[in-house]
Amino acid sequence: MKHRNRIIAVVLLLAVAVLAFLALNKKPKPTTPSSESERVSAMSIAVSVEPATLASVRDSLSVVALVDAWRDVDLHAETSGIVRKVNVEVGERLKAGQPLFNVDDEVAASALRKARVNRELAYRDFERYERLHKEGAVSESSFEAMRLKFADAEADLVAARRRLEDTAIKAPFAGVVTSKLVEVGDLVQPGAKVANMVDLSKLKIRSSIPEKQVSLVTEGMPVQITTDVWPGKVFEARVLSVSAKSSRDHTYEVESVMPNPLKTPFRAGMFARTAFVGKQSREALLIPRQALVGSASEAAVFVVRDGKAKLTKLVAGAEYGTQIEVVQGLAPGDKVVVSGQSDLDDGSPVAVTGPEEAR
């Protein structure tokens, strides 16, 4: 009897072990989507989209510029001698013709007096020979020689007068002295630089425009000038010239001109910002800048069609705030992905979320 009970207990233990083993190794039955649409929905990537829209825009371009004086001139000595007098200091404003320096003029003044005497003697001889020539007392050749001698004396007088005037180095225009390179007692020679002057009555604003946008700028168009020196103020200028030749970095220099404001004056060498605004509006196809995949030069976007994201190449144009123009590649109403595109491949199934889904 005891032996039979033991057998029954062993059998029961084996049965429990087998049931426990089966329960632990039982795999849950995989669930399958009830339809193809449910299967695709489960694989879709959530994205946000916005449509490409037509809008009225006005071409504009804003670049950093440099302010230059209307005239910036180095002054040079035109005669040799010792500087006897200095009439200006750096920063002083001069009128046109006002002397800056006086060079020793004793020799030049003496030469001028001698030239005047020689001219007077030559003139008297010329008058005498002219009377005699009319009377037939002197030959034609003698009279002609005296006439040339008088002309030569007059030329010497003009040269002597000019040499004396050159001993005073004068301002060629009304402006401000920015540097002074000689002092009393210095010896100067013809061609030696002695000072620099600038004319700030008007200003030249120099901008470098990329070749892709230089066609937007034309001579005579208005320009808006701003600077950090006078924040909140906008100054009006006008394009004076557009360079016909680019620099090595493929930019073109545009020179604009504006009067220097009296209450908010500019100084040469200041930085400014120039805004070139087109005269007429035009219609452009715009998409959000954040929709672009890659660079603006090799632009592409994901367009949602039939529930899939299609990678579409396009030609990008100008930027208008957070929007960018599409020159080629899209049509109005195309829905471009603006978020979630980092997870997409060409042809990926997508699920549109956000306001566009409601529309």
Image (cartoon, helix red, strand yellow):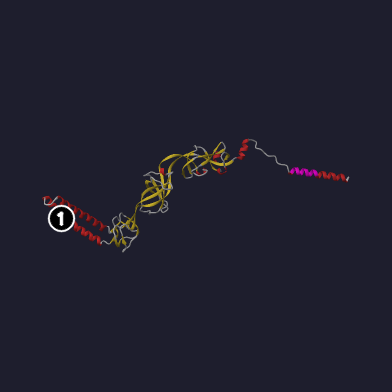
For disc 1, the marked residue is 125
Q: Please name the amino acid that badge 1 sits on.
A: Asp
Residue 22: percent from left, percent from top = 75, 42
| Residue placed furthest toward the bottom | 185
Residue 242 position, x and y percent, is 38, 45
Decide: few, some or many residues near mark 1? Use Cα within 10 Å; few <14, some 14-19, many ≥20.
some
Report the magenta stretch's main SS.
helix
Quarter of the image with the C terminus is top right
Answer yes or no: is residue 43 visible. yes
- Residue 84 visible in image: no
Element at label 1: helix
When the figure is inspected, residue 186 is found, relative to residue 63, above or below; the finding is below
Residue at 81% over, 44% down:
12
Tell me if 21 is positioned left or right of 197 in this view: right
Residue 175 x %, y %:
33, 55
Q: Position of residue 150 (x, y in %)?
A: 18, 54
Q: Quadrant of residue 343?
A: top right
Tell me: 75 left or right of 300.
left
Q: Is residue 128 magenta?
A: no
- In magenta, the rendered stretch is 14-23
Q: Residue at x 77, y 43 (%)?
A: 19
At x 14% / y 53%, what residue is drawn?
Answer: 129
- Residue drawn at x 78%, y 44% is 17
